[in-house]
Image: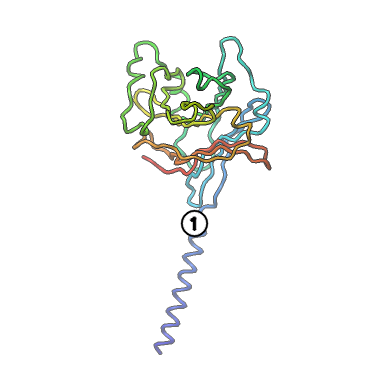
């Protein structure tokens, strides 16, 4: 009888495993793509895209541009030297911790001279609301508090925060001096951290127009701080690429991990 009992138990075990496998498959979410409303940029559009894994966790947060978004962009008009496009997050899918994205087009670049004064895009992923962002200022009585130095744990090793990199309605910019643009080469792309009142409240891939027009495909590690100010899914890498089949550029935060 023992062999029969063993066979029965083995069959039962297999059935139980099969049932658990089916149940697990039923409970797990399918990898998905969630898309925010498109916004007109140039002759095309830009939108935020969040991709998820089978656990319904965010794997990437991206700005996706149609190819014609690089044509028909506005140029400097009087004192207006930067053009802002506010991109909403998707209404569906898991929350990433990012409230909205501000996609800036700089037709003649910005300071520092000789570094970022080339046509380029600043892609700000904000952890604060649009209203809080609009209230950011480095003038008046609150200037000292606004420019308070963040805890060193909020700043990646090697990053610097120049005092002249404080911009109203945006924040203070933490820069990586190992970037090509600070070492005798043309600016192509880099990764920025933003601060206000001592808190880290945006992350920002920057990319030049010339680099996008080269139809790139690159992924590079993100230098990370020891901790963050706001709970969110933060990137270990960022990607800049072009999909010839779809005719789209992607600027993505990737390999996301939750930090509370």
Q: Position of residue 260 (x, y in %)?
A: 36, 39
Up the image or down, 69 lies above or below 75; here it is below
Q: Which residue is mark 1?
A: 27
Front residue of 187 and 123: 187
Q: Quadrant of residue 161?
A: top left
Residue at image x 52%, y 26%? 122
Mark 1 lies on a secondary structure that is helix
Front residue of 85 and 245: 245
Up the image or down, 42 lies above or below 27; here it is above
Q: Position of residue 46 (x, y in %)?
A: 61, 31
Give the residue at the far front of this rendering: 184
Residue at image x 65%, y 28%? 70
Colour style of the rendered protein structure:
rainbow
Give the residue at the far bottom of this rendering: 1
Q: Is residue 37 left or right of residue 238?
A: right
Q: Can residue 90 be spotted in the picture?
A: no
Q: Position of residue 156 (x, y in %)?
A: 37, 33
Q: Can residue 183 be spotted in the picture?
A: yes
Residue at image x 49%, y 44%? 58
């Amino acid at each position: 009888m023992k062999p029969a009992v063993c066979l029965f138990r083995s069959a039962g075990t297999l059935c139980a495993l099969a049932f658990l496998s089916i149940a697990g498959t039923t409970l797990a979410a399918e990898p998905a793509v969630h898309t925010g409303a498109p916004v007109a940029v140039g002759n095309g559009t830009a939108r935020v895209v969040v991709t998820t894994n089978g656990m319904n966790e965010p794997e990437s947060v991206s700005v996706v541009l149609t190819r014609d978004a690089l044509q028909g962009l506005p140029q400097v008009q009087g004192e207006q030297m930067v053009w802002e496009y506010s991109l909403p997050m998707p209404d569906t899918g898991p929350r990433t911790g990012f409230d909205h994205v501000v996609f800036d087009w700089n037709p003649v670049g910005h300071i520092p001279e000789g570094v970022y004064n080339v046509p380029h895009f600043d892609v700000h992923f904000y952890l604060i609301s649009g209203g809080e962002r609009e209230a950011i200022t480095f003038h008046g009585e609150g200037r000292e508090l606004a420019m308070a130095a963040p805890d060193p744990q909020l700043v990646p090793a090697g990053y610097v925060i120049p005092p002249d990199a404080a911009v109203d309605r945006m924040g203070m910019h933490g820069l990586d001096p190992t970037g090509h643009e600070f070492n005798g080469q043309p600016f192509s792309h880099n990764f920025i951290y933003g601060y206000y009142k001592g808190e880290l409240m945006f992350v920002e891939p920057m990319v030049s127009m010339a680099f996008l027009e080269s139809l790139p495909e690159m992924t590079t590690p993100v230098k990370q701080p020891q901790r963050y100010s706001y709970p969110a899914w933060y990137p270990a890498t960022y990607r800049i690429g072009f999909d010839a089949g779809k005719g789209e550029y992607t600027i993505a935060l990737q390999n996301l991990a939750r930090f509370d």
